[in-house]
Image (cartoon, coloured by chain):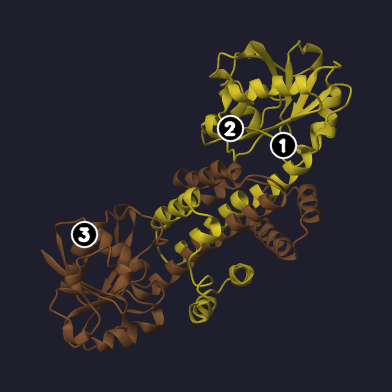
Chain colours: A yellow, B brown
Amino acid sequence: MIRVSIIGSGNVAQHLIVAFNKTTDIELVQVFVRNGAAVAHLINPDKIYNNFNDIIAADLFIVAVTDDAITEVSAAIPFSNELVVHTSGSVSISAIDNKNRQGVFYPLQTLSKSKEVDFKSIPICIETKNEKDFQILEKVAKSISNIVYKINSEQRKALHIAAVFVCNFVNHLYQIGNDICIENDLPFDILKPLIQETANKILTLQPNQAQTGPAKRKDIKTINAHLSFLSDENQKEIYKMLTKSIIDNGKKL
Amino acid sequence: MIRVSIIGSGNVAQHLIVAFNKTTDIELVQVFVRNGAAVAHLINPDKIYNNFNDIIAADLFIVAVTDDAITEVSAAIPFSNELVVHTSGSVSISAIDNKNRQGVFYPLQTLSKSKEVDFKSIPICIETKNEKDFQILEKVAKSISNIVYKINSEQRKALHIAAVFVCNFVNHLYQIGNDICIENDLPFDILKPLIQETANKILTLQPNQAQTGPAKRKDIKTINAHLSFLSDENQKEIYKMLTKSIIDNGKKL
């Protein structure tokens, strides 16, 4: 059994606690939280602490805090030569204070506190400085997920940017679709099957094969009709830019 | 049994043929195609014709052709006072030549020839000029789909634009994610669980509740690091514009 300690109480920390609670391969020994209330419903109160003087030994310390706090928090751990990892997509492995053995444990998923996820299908991207630590981290990752990748810091940065495009920006386009529906007295529900199918298509087709719509067809008449219809300047600019990008992409193929 | 005739052989026509073949409520009497080969695998060759002199009677004629051809093709039908509908999201009901009874039968979905779809879960948006025709169209729609909406031409235009945002533009963001993966020696597969979860989240959360990422957090440091990393000017511009839109949207809430 691998003894894991979590430092942090945000989205990622909370989802990790839930995932570790489900596996017998991991003993979740402690969770550090500034405000115990955030995780009180997820773990035995005896395991919650808010002063690093109360920290106990573990095989792995997972620092699940905001990107900016990783260096400071990892430096505050009153141990050295332990395996300490962060969970960020965009921060280098070197952000972990180097008095400990550095690593990264990055679950590539969009986590909202109010939405449960099945960790088994979440890719976990891991990185360490040596092979022995890699094996520990791999065991922990495989105990909660079926998909584990070895990804270095530079690749992880690229991956995080790609994730911003396919998740954060995509969700914002859902938001715009929602806004257009509301403005025109249409239920957003009507778009949901389309949203699902758009996401499902790329399981079997490459995105360029799956592309449809007026920009793909270079249907300038429809594009202009849409631009005339849109009154929100921001929506109009996004429409123009993405339409141009699809048309230009077609020229490259 | 309602007798339906399809005019056209593109994506929508082909998917409709497959859907009508599956229901006993509809008799698909004929399909007009310029080039019979396109649908020869989907229907008895006796029902395929390419000269309007060979057209036979039906309760409903579905003109599934490109937007620009709707008026011309509907005018070429050598009947009058029949129910004739088009399948376009962006064209008014009036585009159907008014010698016949006009209507619209718009399946709101992204249809690619190479990808089968379950028509039962595709919303069909219908519009007619009178109640009797509405009842016919509703019966036909319900014979192949569980989701049928009455949508007028102005709403349908808005809906089509919203669909461009949540489907065509979303797929283009998948394309960009794919490009970033390829450039950085990462498998696109690693993004697929994230893409699925992003689409699934809005089944239970409003898009603004589901929003995550650096723009939502106003994490300027990460945003700037991403912009420095991106070398493709087009990707950079899209990143900037959508980030600004998410930040501005946060201010409105």
- Answer with the quarter of the image where residue B235 lies: bottom right
Quadrant the N terminus of chain B occupies: bottom left
Circle on res. A24: none
Quadrant the C terminus of chain B occupies: bottom right
Q: CA distance from mark 3 to mark 1?
A: 49 Å
What type is the residue that disc 3 sits on? Asn
Crowd tier of the residue under label 2, counting other residues whose Cα lies within 10 Å: few below 14, some 14–19, many 20 or above: some
Residue A94 point in image, percent of width and height:
85, 33
Q: Residue lying farthest right?
A: A99
Q: Nearer the viewer, residue B110 or A28?
A: B110
- For the residue labelled by badge 3, is the local secondary structure a helix, a strand or a loop? helix
Q: Which residue is mark 3?
A: B21
Q: Which residue is mark 1?
A: A151
Residue B143 point in image, percent of width and height:
20, 58
Q: Is residue B75 visible?
A: yes
Q: Is residue A119 above or below residue A247?
A: above
What residue lies at 33% left-to-right and 72% top-to-bottom?
Answer: B152
- For the residue labelled by badge 1, is the local secondary structure a helix, a strand or a loop? loop
Mark 3–mark 1 CB contact (< 8 Å): no
What type is the residue that disc 1 sits on? Ile
